[in-house]
Image (cartoon, rainbow, N blue to C red):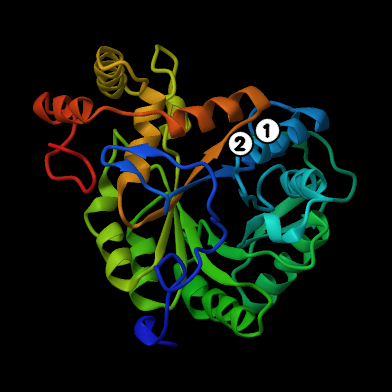
Amino acid sequence: MTAAADGPRPGTPDGPTPAVPAGSTPTTPDGPTPAAALALGAAPLGNLFTALTDEQAYETVAAARRQGIRAFDTAPHYGLGLSERRLGAALRGHPRTEFTVSTKVGRRLEPIDGPTGDDLANGFAVPATHRRVWDFTADGVRRTLESSLERLGLDRVDTVYLHDADHHAEQAFREGYPALEKLRAEGVVDAIGAGMNQTAMLTRFVRDTDIDVVLCAGRYTLLDQSALTELLPAARERNVSVVLGGAFNSGLLADPKPGSTYDYAAAPPDLLARALRLKAVAERHGTTLRAAALAFCAAHPAVAAVLVGTRSAAETDDCAEQFRRAVPAAFWRELVHEGLLPAGLPGVPS
């Protein structure tokens, strides 16, 4: 494997950031941070939980482009390929140099003969036309990427992630990662990485491989800073870019109320109470909890982009506006004073 220090890394001053070009610029606790961009997560375009029409999906992407967003993330898992098809259709006709796309490997889609039922057991309101097969083999990685390119209608993507390898670690490290490394060396993709909802294995990828970027969902937010222990410091040390997803922890930090979700399940009462306290402090300081949640993610110096999944033009416009909204330093200081955030977090006045 190539040593991490052998050359400039994407996301550093000497190299471009993979799949996260400059776009909407946030106002963070210390002021604007041009290195962190807002990116669009396309899971909702795959009918996550509830169905969207094609028109609603295309309007979502059009709103993102209008707001200056140029990075788009998808996966075969999202709606059994529907997200990739819709994203590709929405971007068709735009100059390829004006956007970047990331997708994922690890779940290969196999057609089902005579499909019946839907895919809601996996979270997507689509017909169950395919089955997902876990496959981090070299052949599986290439076949999955080829199918993704066909659905997207593209001849290349900018970044490919190993997706949710939690229970397939050894195959992912032994076969999947070398396959991605070969694709990068061949110039098929610009950047390679891993995307997960946990930090331990992502930290292993950062330390033990030559990946360019990690996508970490929900583990560096106003409610969960577990990525701060090892992942984010390791990423800075190794010059690996970090894309953060799940800034709202699947909903709780967007609009905390009874019935809100945290990590896609009902929010526990203690976390709901904490989120309501965060919201109250935000309102006292003339900002919003949504703006604070996004600014918190963008403030860490290892973070190249913050990924938001929206399901309408209105939601997309709101996220972009919140991302640019000022968050007063006094707000952060009160959170630290009230014990709602630990002191000494990177980029957060205390």
The residue that appears at 27% across and 70% down in the rendered structure is 237
Q: In the rendered view, does 293 fall on the left or right side of 94? A: left
Please give the count of numbered marks on the rendered protein: 2
Q: Nearer the viewer, residue 309 or 82?
A: 309
Q: In the rendered view, does 106 fall on the left or right side of 59? A: left
Q: Secondary structure at mark 1?
A: helix
Residue 88 rendering spot, x and y as whole percentages: 78, 50
Residue 26 rendering spot, x and y as whole percentages: 42, 39
The residue that appears at 82% across and 50% down in the rendered structure is 92
Eyeballing the image, is 162 above or below 44?
below
- Disc 2 versus disc 1: distance between alpha carbons? 6 Å
- Give the residue number, with chain letter if any, for mark 2: 67
- Residue type pointed to by label 2: Gln
Quadrant of res 2? bottom left
Q: In the rendered view, does 6 fall on the left or right side of 320? A: left
Tag shown at residue 77: none
Determine if residue 119 is in view: no
Please state, as top left, top right, bottom left or bottom right, where the C terminus lies in the image: top left
Tag shown at residue 63: 1
Eyeballing the image, is 11 above or below 294?
below
Q: In the rendered view, does 46 fall on the left or right side of 305? A: right
Eyeballing the image, is 89 above or below 165?
above
Residue 46 rendering spot, x and y as whole percentages: 70, 39
The residue that appears at 61% across and 36% down in the rendered structure is 67
Residue placed farthest to the right in the image?
Answer: 114
Q: Nearer the viewer, residue 310 or 124?
A: 310
Are circles 2 and 1 on residues that touch, CB within 8 Å?
yes
Q: Nearer the viewer, residue 24 or 229?
A: 24
> Badge 2, how many Cα within 10 Å: few under 14, some, many 20+?
some
Residue 303 rendering spot, x and y as whole percentages: 38, 53
- Residue type pointed to by label 1: Ala
The residue that appears at 70% across and 61% down in the rendered structure is 97
